[in-house]
Image (spheres, rainbow, N blue to C red):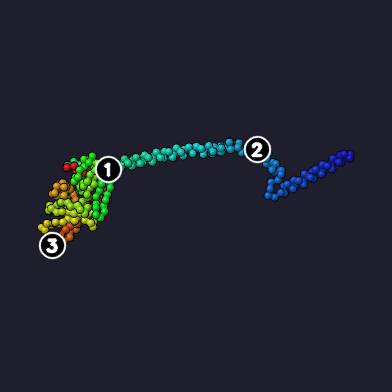
């Protein structure tokens, strides 16, 4: 009887102690209770395992596999893009070469009565005192000094010096240039010279007093002097300047060739 009462008293005391401890641990603000910490050590591995199984079943684990796959595909696409860029450059080069060949073909057809050597302009010296161009052809290609140089629109100039692989051309707009020409209307002979003032026009001088020069007249090489063949286009008269002395009158001639855009030429192999 006594022992039974004693056991009950001990049980009550233990229960009270457990309740007090629970109250203390559960009311600990800002920190996990001891029971929660102990429980988490057992619960978290189980929870992680269940999460892994869930992801495995739902296919979420494929995300990491997809990253590797995307990386490989990106590397392949980068390599392919470089190949395409190279192909585009090659196509552009071919296109440029075709355009050049078309220009040469047009030139050779237009000047089929001449034996010519095609060339490209690789340098331009269009300054106030010198207006020359350099071509990528020279003596090894058959180019010689004083050979005539022409373009689609007409006369460019003549060769003044030659190396094995290049040639220098004095253009007709050079201030030191002088070309024997004729008027399209009267066939009168005149001289066209380059000027310091203008890089796109010539000065037509020594116009015969009886010659009628009008705006719009075309000017061509006369063939006199032996430097240029006859009939090459020079330009058109854009203005006639009268003076007190009729023998001193002159005309401004707009050249046919656009030297700023000149790229392909033919050297006449006379």
Of label 2 and label 1, which has the lower sequence position?
Answer: 2
Give how far across and how far down residue 109 sits, in percent: 20, 42
* Residue 97 shown left or right of residue 223 in the figure: right
| Cβ atoms under marks 2 and 1 closer than 8 Å | no
* Residue 44 shown left or right of residue 85 in the figure: right
Residue bearing mark 1? 100
Label annotation for residue 46:
2
Residue at 21% in and 44% down: 267
Number of marks in the image? Answer: 3
Give how far across and how far down residue 184 sits, in percent: 15, 52
Query: Residue 102: in sight, yes or no?
Result: no
- How far apart are the two marked residues, 2 and 1, measured between alpha carbons? 77 Å
* Residue 261 shown left or right of residue 16 in the figure: left
Quadrant in which the C terminus is drawn: top left
Residue bearing mark 3? 245
- How far apart are the two marked residues, 2 and 3, measured between alpha carbons? 116 Å
- How far apart are the two marked residues, 3 and 1, measured between alpha carbons? 49 Å
Q: Which is more foreground, mark 2 or mark 3?
A: 3
Q: Which is more foreground, mark 2 or mark 1?
A: 1
Query: Residue 135: in sight, yes or no?
Result: yes
Give how far across and how far down residue 218 sits, in percent: 17, 52
Of label 3 and label 1, which has the lower sequence position?
Answer: 1
Q: Residue at the bottom extreme?
A: 244
Residue at 22% in and 41% down: 139
Of label 2 and label 3, which has the lower sequence position?
Answer: 2
Q: Residue at the left extreme?
A: 210
Residue at 70% in and 41% down: 38
Most foreground residue, 140 or 106: 140
Element under disc 2? helix
| Cβ atoms under marks 2 and 3 closer than 8 Å | no
* Residue 122 shown left or right of residue 27 in the figure: left
Q: Which is more foreground, mark 3 or mark 1?
A: 3
């Amino acid at each position: 009887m006594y022992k039974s009462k004693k056991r009950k008293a001990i049980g009550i005391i233990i229960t009270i102690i457990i309740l007090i401890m629970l109250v203390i641990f559960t009311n600990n603000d800002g920190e996990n209770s001891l029971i929660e910490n102990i429980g988490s050590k057992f619960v978290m591995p189980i929870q992680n395992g269940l999460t892994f199984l869930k992801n495995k079943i739902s296919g979420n684990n494929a995300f990491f596999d997809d990253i590797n796959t995307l990386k490989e595909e990106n590397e392949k696409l980068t390599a392919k893009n470089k190949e395409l860029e190279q192909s585009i450059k090659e196509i552009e080069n071919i296109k440029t070469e075709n355009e050049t060949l078309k220009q040469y073909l047009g030139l050779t057809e237009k000047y089929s009565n001449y034996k010519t050597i095609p060339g490209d302009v690789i340098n331009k010296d269009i300054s106030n005192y010198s207006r020359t161009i350099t071509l990528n052809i020279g003596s090894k290609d058959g180019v010689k000094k004083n050979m005539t140089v022409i373009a689609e629109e007409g006369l460019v100039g003549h060769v003044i010096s030659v190396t094995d692989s290049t040639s220098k051309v004095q253009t007709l707009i050079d201030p030191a240039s002088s070309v024997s020409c004729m008027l399209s209307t009267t066939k009168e002979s005149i001289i066209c010279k380059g000027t310091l003032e203008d890089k796109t026009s010539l000065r037509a001088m020594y116009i015969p007093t009886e010659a009628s020069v009008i705006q719009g007249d075309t000017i061509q090489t006369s063939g006199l002097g032996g430097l240029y063949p006859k009939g090459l286009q020079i330009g058109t008269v854009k203005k006639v300047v009268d003076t007190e002395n009729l023998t001193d009158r002159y005309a401004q001639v707009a050249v046919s060739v656009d030297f700023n855009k000149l790229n392909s030429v033919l050297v006449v192999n006379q």
